[in-house]
Image: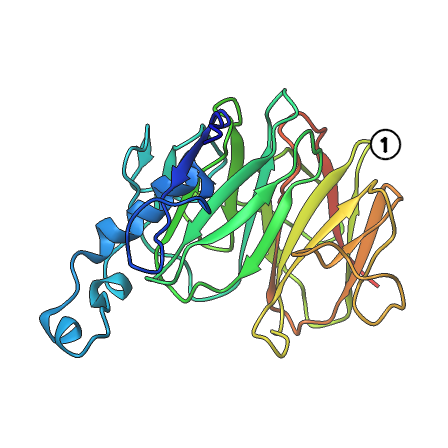
Amino acid sequence: METRAEPEGWTAHPSTDAAGRAGGEGRRKLPKARWVAAWALLAVAGPASPAAAEDGRGGYPGLRTEPFSVRGTRTVTQTWNGAPLVLQVLDNARMPQTPAGSVVFAYLNVARQNNLGELALASGGDSVEYRFAPALATQPEAVVRNWGSNNLSVTNVSANDSTPIRIQAIGPGMPGTTPLALPQNTPVTLAPGAAAQGPTGTRAMQLVVRAPGEDRSVVAVIGGPADASGNNAYVIAVNAEAITGPPGSGNPPPPPGYYATTTSSGFSMDLQWGGSSVFVANLSSSVSPALSVILRRK
């Protein structure tokens, strides 16, 4: 019988034949880090309930009530507050409770090698969601979501050990973000990871974001009335590769999680929010220059 060496970083998943015997030819192979996340679900769930076993369901009722955990993690940040954090492979960050509104979760693969990264996200007992982090990227990936005050667990499950991923979660009032004041008609400088917040006034306003030079920068804007999906958070990239979005503009759709991207160094949003607060955060790479933000009357 031909023997094949297992690729580095992968482990075999034994299949069963028609008689239920372990082994066989058609074996599936998964990254070891994926097995860690899979075993975590079993660790959380525990054994099936007697009632489930009796009626053949084989269910795991604890899966929806216990927090997500990962066996074999290197470092666990039990009380992550959303502040910028670099996760090494198998590091885990846990946010005990998310806001009951839109949160922007951004992540960037900061590996020097050409390594594809991957994160495992879990919240409130839902199934684990895997998100890829492209290699050598300069624009963060974004997830805009309302996790409904549930917890949030993030684990770096990349296949290559040399794949650190920088993560950040931001939203008004979150303890990991202390926003600067955002007065009207006064430019505010935001370094990567920083935020600002201020009232919009009862008249029509305009929020203008500018980046110096040609460096790609990403900003999140949160506030105002929610759309049909309950979202009121918007992620925008300037000095991007293409002009995309916003919805209804006739431009191509933006990348997942984004509201719009532009090839220019500036972007403006019209705000008529009736005096409600606007929250702005710089989600750019840590090596990107600071952004300039101004909230002005139209």
Nearer the observer, 273 or 176: 176
Q: Is residue 105 above or below residue 109?
A: below
The type of residue carrying mark 1 is Glu
Left or right: 298 in relation to 121: right
Nearer the observer, 246 or 164: 164
User: Does residue 186 appear anywhere in the picture?
Assistant: no
Which image quadrant for residue 134? top right
Q: At 87% from the left edge and 48% from the top edge, which residue is drawn?
A: 242
User: Does residue 256 appear anywhere in the picture?
Assistant: yes
Left or right: 236 in relation to 257: right
Q: At 75% from the left edge and 46% from the top edge, which residue is drawn?
A: 237
Q: At 39% from the left edge and 44% from the top edge, which residue is drawn?
A: 81
Nearer the observer, 249 or 197: 249
Left or right: 249 in relation to 275: right
Q: Is residue 178 above or below residue 230?
A: above
Crowdedness near tag 1: few (<14), some (14–19) or many (≥20) residues, C-alpha within 10 Å: few
Q: Is residue 149 above or below residue 79?
A: below
Residue 249 point in image, percent of width and height: 87, 68
Q: How is the image coloured?
A: rainbow
Residue at the limit of the structure toward the front, as seen here: 1
Q: At 61% from the left edge and 55% from the top edge, which residue is drawn?
A: 198
Left or right: 90 in relation to 289: left
Quadrant showing the N terminus: top left
Residue 163 point in image, percent of width and height: 53, 27
Which image quadrant for residue 212? top right
Quadrant showing the C terminus: bottom right
Residue bearing the label numbered 1: 214
